[in-house]
Each structure stands twice: as C-alpha cells, then as structure tokens.
Image (cartoon, rainbow, N blue to C red):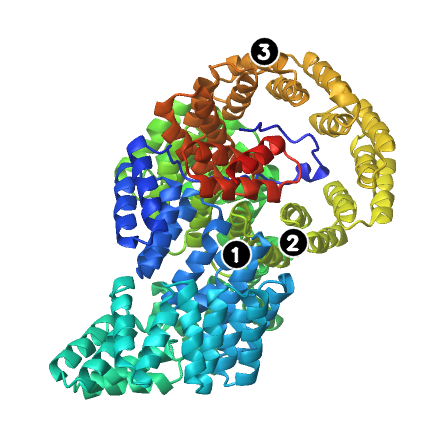
Amino acid sequence: MHFQFLPLRASCRALCLTALLAATLPAGAADSKAGRFYEDALTRYERRDMPGAIIQLKNALQIDKNMLPVQLLLGKALLANGEVAAAEVAFNDALRLGVDRAEVVLPMARAYLAQGKHRLLLDQPAFAMGGLPVRTQIELWVLRSSALSDLGDARGAMHAIEQARGLDPRLPDSWLAEVPVRLRARQLTEAAAAADRALALAPQSAEARYQRGAVYHVQGNLNAAAAAYDQVLALDANHLEARVARAGLYVDMRRHAEAAADLVYLQRLSDQEPRAAYLRSVLAERDGKTAQAKLHLAQVTALLDPAPVEFIQYRSQLLLLNGLAHLGLGEMEKAQAYLESLQRAQGFSPASKLLAQLLLRNGAGERGIGILEGYVRTAPGDKQALMQLAAAYMEQGRNAPAISLMQEALRGDDQPDMRAVLGMGLIGSGQISQGVGELEAALRKQPGQAEAGTMLIGLYLRAGQGAKAAKIAQDLVKRDADNAVFQDLLGMSLALSNDTAGAKLAFERAMRLDGALVAPKLHMARLEIGTRQYDAAGKRLQEILAGDPKNIDVLLELALLADRRGEPRQMLEWLRKADDQAGAVDLRPGLALVDLHLREQQPGPALEAARRVHAKAPPDDLPTQLAYGRAQAANGDRMGAKAAYTLASRLADANAPLQVRIAALQVAIQDVDGAAYSLGKALSSQPQLLTAQALMVDVDVLRKDFASAERRARQIAEQHPKQAIGYSLLGDVAMAQGQRRPGIDLYRKAHQIAPSPDTFSRLSSALWSEDGGKAAVQLAEQWSGQRPADMQARRVLADAYARAGHYAQARTSYESLLKKAPQDPVALNNLANVLLRLKDPAAADVAERAFALAPNDPSVLDTLGWSLFQAGAASQRERALGLLRDARLRAPGNASIRYHLATVLAQAGRTTEARAEVQGALDMAPTFEYRADAEQLLRGLR
C-alpha cells in the first residue's frame, strides 16, 4: 500500500523524454480455489514432490492462467523435474505476465544450459547483468562460466568467474565454479586449491565438499573421494551429483552392494537419470544378467537418443555414455555417430545462394546483387543496370555502395534520373539535406520527373513543410491533372498546410479519377479523424476493409481511430491484425504495438513486440533501435537498452533534435556518457539548440561537473532572459551541490518569470524540505486555486495534502478530482490509501475500482491486497495473499510491498516465507514507512 505521487522534480529532460513506464499484460487476482492449489503446490515443492506440485500448479492455471506466482513456481518445479523446455516456456510466461527479471533470470539460465542453449545464454539481452541485484549477478556470472567452459573457452570461463569473485570475494560461489573449469583443463593443483578455498569459506556447504570429492576422484584418490561424497550426502541426502558419483565410485571399487543401494536411492530421486541406468547395466552384466543389462542400456538410449543435439553436444559424458550404450546393444552405426560427435568440432552452418535479377523480387537480394555486379563489370556503360544495382543495394540497406556507384556514373553523364537515385541513396544513409539537394537538382533539370517529385513531397510532408510539398504537388497536377496519385499528394500537402477544404477537394478528385485507389480514401478518413468526424471516418474505413480485409494501411487507420476515440483495447486488436498481415518488411504495426504497450504500462508485451520487429528489421533501422531500446529499458534491461541507444545515436548522425531525444533516453537508463556523446553530436550540428543545451546541463550535473553545468546554465539564462529554463537549471545545479537556500531562490525566480508545471514542480519539491512541507502545501493551494479547471493542478494539490499527512483534505481533493475523472486509477489508488489511513472501510471498494482499471500496477495490487487484509474478512484473506504475491513479483524492490506480504504470510502460518520477506524488506530499505512495524514482525517470527 503506497501512494503514486506525480514527480515533484521535473528536470529539463521532460522537454524531450518520452514515457518509459512499466507494467504487463492484464492478470486478475487469484481465485480462492486457484490460491489453494498454489499453496498446496508450494508445500509439495518444498517437500520435493515435483510431480505433485506440477499437477496442482496446472490445476491453478486452469482457473487463472495469469497468476504470476503460479507461473514462476511451475517453471521451477518443471526445471527440478527435468522438464527443461517446458520450464523455459513457464518462465517466459512469467516474464510476459510481469514477474521481475531478477526473479526469473537464474532458473531461466539453468533451463537454457540444460537445453544446450549456451550461445543464447551468453548473447540474449534477457541475461544481461544490468539492473540485477549483486547476489543474482554473482550466480549469473557463475552460470556464464559454465556455458563458456562447455564451449571450450576456458579463458572466458575464468574471466566470468573473476567477475563473480570481484563482486563479493567472501562468497564461495566463484571458487566452486572454478573447480570444474580447472578439472576440464587438467589443472588439478589449481582445482584442489579452489575447492579448498570454497570449503574454507563455507565449511558446511554440501556443494563445496562435493567439488573437493570430485578433485580427489579425478586424482585417483578413491578412498578420499568416497569419504568426501559421504560427507556431502550426510549434509544433503538428495545431492544428485554426489549420489551418482559415489555409485560410480563404488562400481569401480567393486563395492556392489553399496553401489546398488545408491542406485535404489537414485531411482526414487529421478527415474530419468541415464547415468544411473548405465551403472545398473554394469552391475547386471557383472552378475551375468545379460538380458537385464540390455534393458538398462536400452533405457539409456531411450533417454538420450531423443535429446536434441543442442542439449547433448556440450555433455561429453553423455555422448560417451550413449555411444557405449549403443555399442552394447550392437547398434554400431549409432554408436559410431555418438563417438564421432564426441571428437567432432562444431561450427558448420547451411548456406545457399539464389540466382538472377528476377530473384530480387522474390527476396533473394544478395544473389541478385551478385548477378548485377557481374553484369556491370562486363557492361559498365549500361546506365539502367547501374541504377538497378544501386536500387538493389539500397533495398538491402547498403546505401554507401549505391552512393558511390551513382557518383561515379554521374561523372560521365549527368542524367536527372541517376541524380534522383543518388539523392535517394543519400537519404537512406541519413544524409537528408544532401539527398534533398540532389533531388531538387534532378527536379530542376527535369521538372516533370515524377519519381524525384513524389519523393521530395514525401520528405517535405515528414518534415512538416506543407507549403513546399504543395508547391511541387501543384506543379505535378498541372502537368497531369488526371493522375489520381498526384491529386492525392496534393490533398496530403494541403491538409498539412491546414487547408482542409482544398485537401478535401483534392481527395475527392483522386477518388473520382481512380475508384480502386485506396490511398485517397485513407487520407480522407484521416482528414475526417482530424476534424473529429469519427463516424464518417469509421464508415469509410470499414467499407475499404470489406473489400480488402488484409490491407495494413486500413488496419492502421482503424487503430488510429480507436485511439482518438479513447478505446485502447480496440486499438490493440486492430494493431495485432495489422501486425499479423505485415510480413517480413512492414515494420509499422510492430512499432505501433511497442508504443501502445509502453503507453499502457505493459513492458512484457512491449518487449515481445519489439523483438519481433527487431528480428525482421534491417540492422540500421533507427526507429526499430529506439523502440527496442525503450522496451528493454521498460523491462529493466539497462545494458540492452544502452546498446540499442548507442547504435541509434550512430545512425542519427547529424540530426540534432533526434540526438537530443536519444540522449534523453540514455539519461533515463543512467548512461550518462552515452548521453554526453549524443548531445555533443547535436550541439556540433546546432550549437544554439536550447533542448540540447538544457539537457547537457543535466548531464554535467549527473557527472558532478558542476562548474561546466553552472557555466552552461548561466549562458542559457543570459541568452533567454525571459524564459524560466536558465534559472531552473541554475537551481538544479545549486540543489545538486547541497545549496538548498540558493536553489530555492533560483526556482522561485524561475517560477516568477514564467510560471509553468515545470517551474512549480521544481519549487514545490525543494520546499518540502522546509517546515514539514507547509510552504509546499501553500504553494500547491495557490497553484490549484489559480487554475480551478486544471485537472493536473487538482491532482498536485491532492498529492500535496496526502504527502503532508492532511488526510481529510486529501480525501476531499481526490474525491473532487474523481468527479471529473472517475476512471483515473492513480487517483483511485491514492484515495484508497488515504481511506486506509483514515480507517474508513470504503478503502477496499475504492481499491477495487483502481484494480479494475490497472490490474497490473504493483502499487494498485498492493493497496487492494492490504485493504482486503485490513478489512479482516476471512473470506478475503486468500485473495489478499494472491494479490500481494503478484505485487511482490512485479516490484521485488519495494520494501513496503514485501512487508505487507510478510504480514499476511505470518497470519497464514507460513512463518519461514514470512521471515524471508520481512528480512528482505529490512535489508533493502534502511528507511521506509513501515520499518518499525517490520522490525517488530521479524522479532515475533524468530
């Protein structure tokens, strides 16, 4: 239960930073029956009854497929039961539903290793270290070392181990991970030293004793190895590797009765263990039971033959085991295949080339380019072939050779059509102004050149230069008034120039000239949407769709119409339909889906959509890189977002406004150096660009270069004396240096020069540190009183009352706000919190309303769960527990949520889990609202 106040410090990043909020797909609270299935499954899981746990978890999912705790526990249970592919699916479902990556990344990594997906584990952004707790990073580095070792990269494996050790050398994990790496390299002395170091750090660690036993085993000291395995199993009787190793050791030592006892125990632990089956065959063979031995060998091959090569290729022991099993069964070809696989290097990959210029149309671009390149070498004077080759290069995103080809051709013959192709290549490479210049030159030399003219119109339209676009379009129409495409371009240009009547006439002429042409109908519908003629637009679009149900442009316009009507679910449906039809080239629906999911605070679906777009987009597609980075950032993958934004900055080149946007995104993920680089490029292109100058002040502050920040802020104040931004920035610099009083004075001056939500936020935030926030409340009252119709001002006042503890006034303000905006989930959530503090039983009903609107917001889930628990109704306790579990998985770093969950768990008798949650809350937050209560709860649980 906590408030969701608007930020009270809005830096100048707000000038250009887009929303990067987070949430996930809708997931209702756990049904009480589903909750009981989950609790029973959790008990079974703790008893290591994995099959029983899996059954109960699947029962829960039959009732509510969106229960986050169920999906997460199902993945863990499947993994423990050896169903690794199914476990990966469950973990992906948990991530999609909103479970924090830190909760999933380790078991997911183990599932990848178990499937042989080593390269994916090393390369996928889902396993990036950024944003993970230190303990999780250590374990992930250890798993990376295992993957690298399997791949034969011993140096990389040791580097990963050193990274883990550097995070906390007091933990035994890195030393334990070093042992198998050293053993694989036959560095037995180093392996023994690492095992001894791990034992010194964790004398009671079963894993440390197992690794010491493994070293003894490889050294041939069988008695010492057996003693070490005995110690492991005394600490953990279910340690699978120690049990298998000791059984094998007993077989080697011909201690058959003891080996058989271990194999019986292993059968109870897992009947899917091929090593145990092989050892049983050895014992049966020694006892003269040939038929039984063959049955056990057949069990080995039945377990390993279906395993994909990705799973088995890194497991030399299993490759050898299956080869020997097939040999024992007389299956020589299969035995040879596995034994050869043991020695054969990997790395081959299939590749095929397609033929001829015709194949360019079928998507076989590289082969088509090869044919054209060969032809151009034999016929360098064929201008048409040169232009075809240049166009093919551009189709593949290879603008540099296209530009070079056309520049070389133009030296001998300055033809307008070749200059137009050159302009297109320059534009494709990001050299927009040079490309526009070439197109304009081509059009001057040949005014009727339609291709150059239409491309220029498109560029002008994208740049918002309607008048320039209209001038070219009118010239094209004069030359060919019966061309419906030209009329449509004229309509678009006039619409951008705010000539609605002229645009309508042009679109109508285009439709009369060519009734089958869809574009003018779409553009007329867009004009109607822009003038709020929603019914007319909807009717027009549905008519088009009836004749062409797979038209992506129509589907996108219907999505736009749904957006303008305030129907996000309908918008999502149209975008999904468009994306289904988009194929491998059209990125628009996918990018629109990313934007919608981020706007609706659904980071999991946003990342899924971004990955789909990223997979089919050219590597230098800038909008895709930005969308991918934003989705990664929303999901907590800071390193992935950083890489995407870095590439985007390189692609943006000299586009100063775009570089500022990228820099703002980089600041949001704390990539300060990256932001400085992007802003440097922006300012080198446009030194006086205010947004770039202002954001650079922020960056200087973040880098603690206060002298540069102050100097730059003063320059802004001097250059723009009638704007507040310079004084606001100077206030930021002062506050960052702890100069509170000068900072407040500067914020007040900025607010006096040009009052705005930004100046109010800065001043209000600073005033909260004075006199219990009285001055801040007074400022909020004044600000709201001057703007009685401003909903944002009303929210600010309500938040101020709540923050100051004036709950009666906060209640009145939130209720007043909700009369005007009854569907505001944040206001509803905050009102529910106020009512809880006033001990008003209506809190739960208000929280239910917030939950209905924002079922994935952890703050809302927490408030509803806590209010149901506080209401005291026994019938609601299971639901409260389910809600709080959901909230905790979505926001594991929130101490208040973990305290609430611990309280409800303690009341339910789940003492161990409650203790872990409350201890986690206390460890992560030295100060939070419920700390004293949390400390008292922990004392009661000991």
Return the x and y of residue 346 as percentages of the image width and height.
40, 80
Please rate how many residues cluster around mark 3, counting C-alpha atoms within 10 Å: few if below 14, some from 14 to 19, many from 20.
some
Residue 870 visible in this rendered orientation of the protein: yes
Return the x and y of residue 22 as percentages of the image width and height.
52, 40
Residue that extends furthest to the left in the rendered view of this protein: 291
Nearer to us of marks 3 and 1 is: 3
Decide which of 749, 762 is in the foreground and name it: 762
Q: Secondary structure at mark 2?
A: helix
First along the sequence among labels 2 and 3:
2
240 vs 772, left or right, is: left
Q: Are marks 2 and 3 in contact (CB under 8 Å)?
A: no
Residue wearing tag 2: 433
365 vs 689, left or right, is: left
Q: Secondary structure at mark 1?
A: loop
Q: Are marks 1 and 2 in contact (CB under 8 Å)?
A: no
Residue wearing tag 1: 621
**Real-space CA distance between mark 1 and mark 2, rounded to the nearest whole angstrom:** 19 Å
Image point (31%, 42%), residue name: 40
Amino acid type, callout 3: Thr
Image point (58%, 78%), residue name: 193
**Real-space CA distance between mark 3 and mark 1, rounded to the nearest whole angstrom:** 50 Å
Nearer to us of marks 2 and 3 is: 3
**Relative to 909, does residue 413 appear above or below in the rendering?**
below
644 vs 305, left or right, is: right
Return the x and y of residue 602 as percentages of the image width and height.
46, 40
**Relative to 849, does residue 228 appear above or below in the rendering?**
below
Residue 552 visible in this rendered orientation of the protein: no
Residue wearing tag 3: 812
**Real-space CA distance between mark 2 and mark 3, rounded to the nearest whole angstrom:** 56 Å
Q: Secondary structure at mark 3?
A: helix
**Relative to 860, does residue 93 appear above or below in the rendering?**
below
First along the sequence among labels 1 and 2:
2
